[in-house]
Structure formats: C-alpha cells, structure tokens
Amino acid sequence: MRTLDVARRARRDIDLILWTSHDRHGARAADRYRRLIAKAIEDLRADPDRPSSRAAGIGDLRLYALAVAAQGMPPTNRVGDPPHVIAYRFDDSRVEIVRVLHGAMDLPTHLA
C-alpha cells in the first residue's frame, strides 16, 4: 500500500472544517465528519486512481468528493450532503493530500 502524506495546509483545512462542524452542528456531527474524512483518505490511499475522482485541471492534482466517500458509510455515521473535496496527487509509492476544500470555493485559486 502507498504511504500517505497529509500536507500542513490540508491538516489546517481539516482542523478548521471539524471546528466549524462542531461549532455549528455539535460534537456528534463533528465526529461523523471526522470519520468521513478519515474514510475518504483511506479510500484514496487504497486506490488513488479510482474512477470517482477527477482531474483538478491543475498539474497532476485530482479531486475526490467527500459525498462519494459518504455513500460507503454506515447509516449511523452518514453525513447528509458533505460539500468538501480532497485535492491530492499520487505516484506508485505515495499519496499526498494537498488540501481539503469546500466545493463551492474557487478551487483553482486555492490550489495554485
């Protein structure tokens, strides 16, 4: 299995997303979102070239929507309509998580 590298900016994105989720929706919702992000990252580590990801249009970056990962979550841990995407790149030995961003953002600006 490929090694995993989560960039500092991606870690900050995740921290902010979870803090905001906790603030707006409570501890249980934040925990569900944390589990979803962890599942999505493990999905990418296991198969970064998955058909449900798409090219970001910026170099070798790809995007994986948390909404896709949410479909595989058990009903008790499901997040309704997660709006975030994971920007990542990979090669034969590693997966690098670059950012975790809201899908409504101007992604090229935040990924440049």
Image: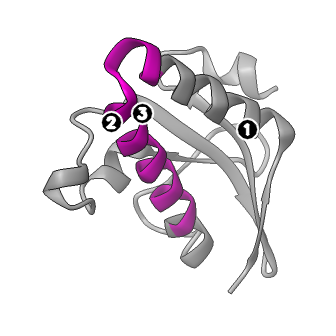
Magenta stretch: includes residue 97: no
61 or 98, nearer to the observer = 98
Which mark sits nearer the N-terminus, 2 or 1?
1
- Residue 85 image point, x, y percent: 51, 38
Left or right: where 22 falls relative to 88: left
Residue linked to disc 3: 30
Residue linked to disc 1: 10
What's drawn in magenta, residue-wise? 21-42
Vertical placement of residue 47 versus 53, above or below: below
Q: How is the image coloured?
A: one colour
Mark 1 vs mark 3, foreground winner is 3
**Secondary structure under the numbered disc 2 in the rendered image:** helix
What label does residue 28 carry, if any? 2
- Residue 98 image point, x, y percent: 76, 43
- What residue type is disc 2 on? Arg
Mark 2 vs mark 1, foreground winner is 2
Q: Residues within 10 Å of mark 1 (few under 14, many from 20)?
A: many
Residue 49 figure quarter: bottom right
